[in-house]
Image: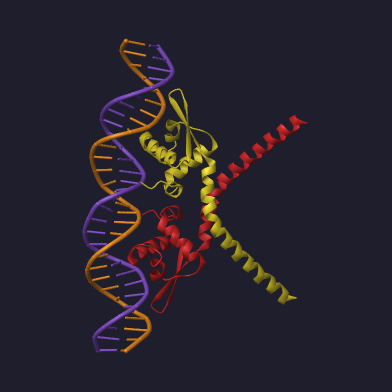
Chain colours: A yellow, B red, C orange, D purple
DNA sequence: TATATTTGCAACCAATCGGTTTCACAAGCA
DNA sequence: TGCTTGTGAAACCGATTGGTTGCAAATATA
């Protein structure tokens, strides 16, 4: 089974869970309260996120607090870098065009 | 059918296609040559990418050149912003800890 | 100890996914 | 006018997905 961060963030519910626990650690029940779905379904999502190492658990009594492994999010950022180079180049090209126009106006 | 950029980049073949045509426009056949799969399968991926407006087509005779809509990639970048804020805050917190240690050393 | 709460896991289900094969339709070329 | 080339679409297939229900285990509480 493929388990990577791109597959993890493909699901909108999982993206919402990620955004939720990014701010503070939460229990599965507390997370499920925010969604129109069952606790078990959220539990499944958390399992997937854990398998991708996007999420870490901390047991407190019978409760388990889930929080985001923010470092893992940088993998997406890193993948975007190759395209960032391109859109910056495009921007520079546009910049050149603009400055050429400016010179012509003088 | 859900069609968004996150679902589009979830598949590794589609990510590879995106990276390929980011540099230069290519025909479906030329793209398929780079993968261990059929042209029709690549065609399906291109349809999905087109539906997400991640890709644009340019017909030249009977050939169709596909290229990346680089602007659309910024949607992922934009989504990452919320987390970028967090990891920068973490960094600042670490920075504070380090400067506190430095002061104590004096 | 008996009961309630919090959780994960397994079994099942309909829908979707990624792939293949087959076909249809243009556009170039002999 | 045939024939080849480049392409998309449809039909089908096994695997995976996201959801549900039901159950078991562990912890807290009476």
Q: Is residue A36 above or below residue D23?
A: below
In the rendered image, residue D14, in percent from the top left (x then y), is placed at 24, 52
Does D20 sit left or right of B86 as displayed? Answer: left
What residue is at 47 percent from the left and 64 percent from the top? B20
What residue is at 61 percent from the left and 64 percent from the top? A91
- In the image, A11 versus A77, the foreground residue is A77
Does C13 sit left or right of B32 as displayed? Answer: left
Q: Is residue B68 among what the camera can see?
A: no
Classify residue D10 by image quadrant: bottom left
Q: Is residue C15 above or below residue A38?
A: below
Classify residue D30 by image quadrant: top left
Does A50 sit left or right of A81 as displayed? Answer: left
Q: Is residue A4 among what the camera can see?
A: yes
In the rendered image, residue A62, in percent from the top left (x then y), is placed at 43, 24
What residue is at 41 percent from the left and 70 percent from the top? B30
Does C22 sit left or right of B61 as displayed? Answer: left
Number of marks: 0
Location of the C terminus of chain A by quadrant is: bottom right
In the rendered image, residue B19, in percent from the top left (x then y), is placed at 48, 61
């Amino acid at each position: 089974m493929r388990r990577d961060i791109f597959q993890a963030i493909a699901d909108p519910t999982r993206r919402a869970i990620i955004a939720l626990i990014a701010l503070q650690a939460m229990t599965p029940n507390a997370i499920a309260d925010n969604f129109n779905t069952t606790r078990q379904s959220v539990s499944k999502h958390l399992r997937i996120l854990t398998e991708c190492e996007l999420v870490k658990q901390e047991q407190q009594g019978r409760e388990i607090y889930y929080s985001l492994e923010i470092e893992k999010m940088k993998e997406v950022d890193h993948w975007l870098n190759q395209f960032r180079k391109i859109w910056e180049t495009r921007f520079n090209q546009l910049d050149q065009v603009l400055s050429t126009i400016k010179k012509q106006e003088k």
